[in-house]
Image (cartoon, rainbow, N blue to C red):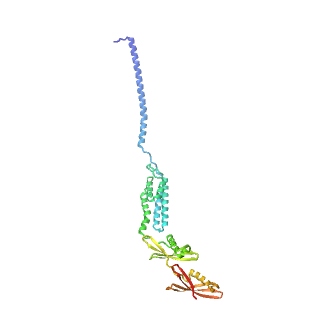
Amino acid sequence: MIHLRAPLRARARSFISAATWRLAVLGLGRKAQGVEIASMNDVSDPQRSSDEEESRTEPPEPPRPRDVGVGLVVAALALPVLAGGVLLFVTSFALSLAISGGTVLVSALLLAIDASRLGRIDLKGRQAESAVILFVGMCLLWIVVYPIAFFRRKRFEGPNLGVPAILVTLFFVGGPILRAVLVAPDLPGCDSREVVQLLDQVIRGTPVGAKARSIDGHCEVSHDQVTDRRQGQCVVHTDGGEVTVNYLVQWRDRDKGLFEVLIPPPGLPSCTSREVVQLLDRVIRGTPMGAKARSIDGHREVSNDQVTDRRQGQCVVHADGGEVTVNYLVQWRDRDKGEFEVWIIP
């Protein structure tokens, strides 16, 4: 056991107390620093956590709808209805095709412009088809893509016109088909394009048509409602003059929409017809009496023998020596070829 003296004891006690005080001060400083750090963390961490919590709980604000109006879509919806109503009364295939194609093109253009104005991001932030894709799709497959364009528009703003678009599509496409099934077709007119084309082929297969330079003047003379037969007339221009051709348009098979164009056997021209007068003038001027003729007129028909199909006419030749009455006959040379002849009766 060590025994310290009194002065040494006092010094040891003072050293121990000083060391203890320093350690106590150092510990308090560390505690204070820890409190300060903790307090700073306590101040900063709640703010950061609250911001993070807010960012997690609040969803991103959806894009606001664009107010583009419904004028274009209403026009695109009404156009097929009007066109479908017109197609119910159109009989020409070319005109029906033009109306249908124009309706598809214009309605596709209107909906594409409307889609372009709405943009590609809908109200839920999803990306939709572009306006170009919609336009091409409607041009290629209108019956499918046309209603889709209206359902696509509902994702951007109201009203929902998808169901009316489906009804319009069915009316535009199914209306003419239903009419063709339920309503019998009308006989084409004598001046319609399909009749004129078929008549041209028939005429050019005849002896008159072989000499034809052109065929025009198509018109309808009559329409028999009972037999549903049309009678027309046209003019064939040949090197030898003009020839009037009568023709008939009638059904071959109405259920199938097949019609035919017939040229009936020609009737013997009258004594006062233009072709008979022209031919008679050449015959008279080939005689000694005709060489002195100044003019020939007064053509009239005296009789028409239905049995022999022969006509007798009369005209007056004005010559220097006076007037001479000439009697003449008009009869067939070859009826199948439409050739007739004029004789002067002695």
Towards the viewer: 44 or 326: 326
* Spot occupied by residue 144 in the image (x, y as percentages of width and height): 43, 58
Q: Which residue lies furthest to the left in this view?
A: 1
**Residue at horizontal 43%, vertical 35%?**
44
Give the quadrant of the C terminus: bottom right
Examine the rendered structure and indicate whether residue 254 appears above or below residue 151: below
Examine the rendered structure and indicate whether residue 134 appears above or below residue 213: above
Towards the viewer: 51 or 269: 269
Examine the rendered structure and indicate whether residue 94 appears above or below residue 48: below
**Residue at horizontal 39%, vertical 13%?**
10
* Spot occupied by residue 234 in the image (x, y as percentages of width and height): 53, 75
Q: In which quarter of the image is residue 236?
A: bottom right
* Spot occupied by residue 202 in the image (x, y as percentages of width and height): 50, 73
* Spot occupied by residue 221 in the image (x, y as percentages of width and height): 51, 76
Examine the rendered structure and indicate whether residue 143 appears above or below residue 42: below
Q: How many marks?
A: 0
**Residue at horizontal 58%, vertical 81%?**
279
Query: Can residue 221 be seen in the rendering of this structure?
Result: no
Q: Residue furthest right?
A: 320
Query: Can residue 140 be seen in the rendering of this structure?
Result: yes
Left-right relation of 222 to 299: left
Left-right relation of 258 to 300: left
Give the quadrant of the N terminus: top left
